[in-house]
Image (cartoon, helix red, strand yellow):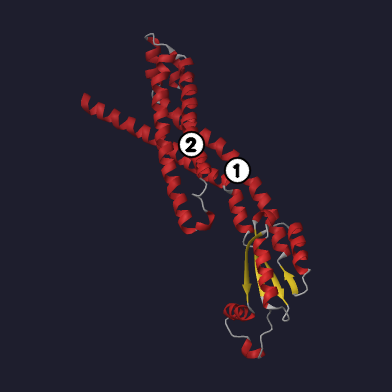
Amino acid sequence: MSKSFERYQKRKLISSYFSVVLSIGLVLFLLGILGMLVLNTKKLADHFKEQITISVFLKDSAKQVEIDQLQKSLAMSDYTKSATFVSKEEAAEQHSEEIGENFLDFLGYNPLKNSVDVKLNADFVSTEQIEVIAEEIAARSFVEEVSYDRPLIALLTENVKKISFWILVASAVFTFIAVLLINSSIRLSIYSKRFIIKTMQMVGATKKFIRKPFIWTNIKLGMIGAFVALLALGLVMYYIDLNFPELQLFQDVLILSVLFVSVFVLGVLISLISTYFATQRFLNLRTDDLYY
């Protein structure tokens, strides 16, 4: 009978520990995902900004030497990420693929122009800066036209600011929720041992002596939960990097280290503080209040 009761108590204890570890792991995993977004917001914004293309259309009278000089000068400019020459023949092929038929058969000639497609570095992607760059390029005598999507650039700049702001707000809210959830899990775990706490106190154990094993146990559970969260976070980041290598998530080791250490420390810190206050609450309760 006593062995059966001991097995029951052991299963109950393991179940309690498992629920605490799972709660901490899930909450820290979500916080880690959010932290990854916060730390990589600029990188994500830069990625989308660098997809913006300025098309420099050239006159038919433009000489090859002038075209080569333009491409080289653009490629060497601070604001340029890449400068690619696109001949009118290549442009016609691309256009035919997009519309699904060869428009040259209908027209009988190629109306398109030779061009240089310029992709800018993210720091230069704003309406004002691109206007200055476009005017500078258009000043060349052999340039027919400089074309870019003005409304898209304005919309992108505005949305990046909004998204950055709301990600920070969401981070603050989720951090608060994470603290509450982990605190609730630990308090429930300690609530089941409230009679043990009071019994130890009644036989003369000091508050520090009673708190110590609970704090150490939950710190270990917090560490395990943080490890589970970091493992899941690493797998998600690996999957994202595999499918979107241009984001280069593993390139900045310092940012990754800060993120992983922060998640681990947060798990341990919340566990420690929650356990301290939870045990303190039951230590301060009268015996009659333990039944409510």
Horizontally, residue 217 falls left or right of residue 67, namely left
Image quadrant assignment for residue 59: bottom right
Q: Position of residue 236 (x, y in %)?
A: 45, 50
Query: Residue tagged by mark 2?
Result: 261
Residue nearest the observer in this picture, 59 or 179? 59
Instruction: Say which element carries label 2.
Output: helix
Amino acid at dot 1: Ala
Horizontally, residue 157 falls left or right of residue 48, namely right
Q: What is the crowding at mark 1: few (fewer than 14 residues within 10 Å), some, or many (at least 20)?
A: few
**Which residue appears at 60% of the width and 49% of the height?**
41
Using the numbered discs, state the Cα–Cα distance from disc 2 to disc 1 in whole angstroms.
21 Å
Image quadrant assignment for residue 152: bottom right
Q: Position of residue 93 (x, y in %)?
A: 58, 80
Of all residues shown, which one is farthest toward the top?
A: 204
Residue nearest the observer in this picture, 84 or 19? 84
Q: Position of residue 112 (x, y in %)?
A: 68, 80
Q: Position of residue 189 (x, y in %)?
A: 41, 28
Query: Residue tagged by mark 1?
Result: 170
Image quarter where the N terminus lies is: top left
Amino acid at dot 2: Val
Mark 2 or mark 1: which is in front? 2
Looking at the image, is 107 positioned above or below residue 242? below
**Which residue appears at 49% of the width and 20% of the height?**
281
Looking at the image, is 176 positioned above or below residue 51? above
**Which residue appears at 45% of the width and 21% of the height?**
279
